[in-house]
Amino acid sequence: MPERFERCERFDHFMARANAEYYATHDPYADFTTAPELTQVFGEILGAWARIVRQMLGSPENLILAEAGPGRGVLMADALRVFGPAQVHFIETSPRLRAEQALRVPNAIWCDSLEAVPAGPMILIANEFLDALPVRQFIRRSSGWMERFVADGGYVEQATEFPLPDDPENSVREINEPALAFVEQLARRGAIALLIDYGPLASAPGSSVQAIAQGKYANPLENPGSADLTAHVDFANLAAAATGAGADCQGPVKQNAFLTALGLPQRTDMLARKSPEMAENLRLAARRLTAPEAMGSLFKAMAICPKGFPPLPGFETL
Ligand code: SAH
């Protein structure tokens, strides 16, 4: 049984503990699915993306191919078929998922954090990683901004000096500090990073935290560790952090524009013709990834790169 959480915990601390427990004890894919789990074409075209980026970097011998939050390792296994042999670094904290990843990418090196990945030229991919990182939550009251804490399965509020926009009363704002630190670090390293996640193009107020347990929406404050907690990614805020740390950003673009520019439809058709028994599933998955009412529009792709870096594949038309 998980330890009972402390009586009053800042919301992001609560979310961090709940997710660490959840990812260490559950098979998340029993509760939700993700792009690489839907179709091998997703990982393959990201492998092709990374291959072109490696060329743009001048094919350095000591290149690090990294992935943050690799899940079951499916994306990387698919990507490597196109990318070719590479020294893969996985940033993953769940021992359970590390074991899954080792089945598919046996020669990877595992790290707990981006800091632990050795220095050197780096291409990093992260799909639905940032949305799992804990957010601080603030709510605007007549007296000013309050920060949300969790106590006995409910919210409690405490006045805060945290600088936030002047939103109407009862507005909620979320700040993802680990995600901001993550992109700042990528920027300082001069890494090329592809971040794919769900969230709006422009920062907006509102609570986006959701909990999924056993495939259904659940109360995020109930039974911590039994549900996957996620929050929308604030791409505009991350872009500002990356540029503030000296990097350039490309995008965000909607996932359907990005995947279509990289040839998802063509590769899907090619595979479907080669393996007719897979054709129906491949086409359904491609549609789910690109249809605006499914994952095509809410999901975005954004790249971080050194200042002045030429347009990366999928971002050329910006
Ligand atoms: N990219 C995968 C998995 C997404 S689920 C996919 O597309 O299917 C989120 C992943 O991030 C899991 O692998 C989870 O264990 C990992 N994760 C969550 N919080 C983390 C943290 N703080 N540090 C490293 N990995 C984390």
Image: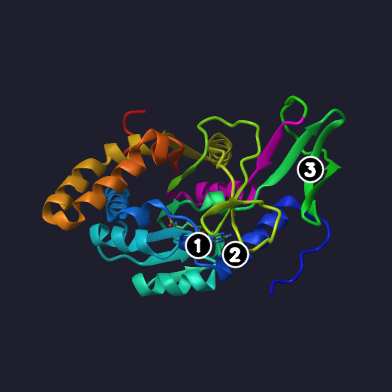
The relative height of residue 95 versus residue 216 in the rendered view (above or below) is below
- Asked if the magenta segment contains residue 176, the reply would be yes
Q: Residue 80, image x and y in percent? A: 29, 61
- The residue indicated by pointer 2 is 22
Q: Which quadrant is home to the N terminus?
A: bottom right
- Asked if the magenta segment contains residue 317, the reply would be no
Secondary structure of residue under mark 3: strand
Q: Residues within 10 Å of mark 1 (few under 14, many from 20)?
A: many
In contact (CB < 8 Å): disc 1 and disc 3: no
In contact (CB < 8 Å): disc 2 and disc 1: yes
Q: How many marks?
A: 3
Mark linked to residue 102: none
Secondary structure of residue under mark 1: helix
**Mark 1 within 8 Å of ligand 1, using the beta carbon:** yes
Q: Residues within 10 Å of mark 3 (few under 14, many from 20)?
A: many
Q: Which quadrant is home to the C terminus?
A: top left
Residue 204 occupies quadrant: top right
Q: Nearer the viewer, mark 1 or mark 3?
A: 1
Q: Of residues 197 and 251, which is closer to you in this image?
A: 197
Q: CA distance from mark 1 to mark 3?
A: 29 Å
Mark 2 and mark 3 lie on one chain; the one further toward the N terminus is: 2
- The residue indicated by pointer 3 is 147
Q: Residue 124, image x and y in percent? A: 42, 54
Q: Residues within 10 Å of mark 2 (few under 14, many from 20)?
A: many
- The residue indicated by pointer 1 is 28
Q: Amino acid at mark 1?
A: Pro
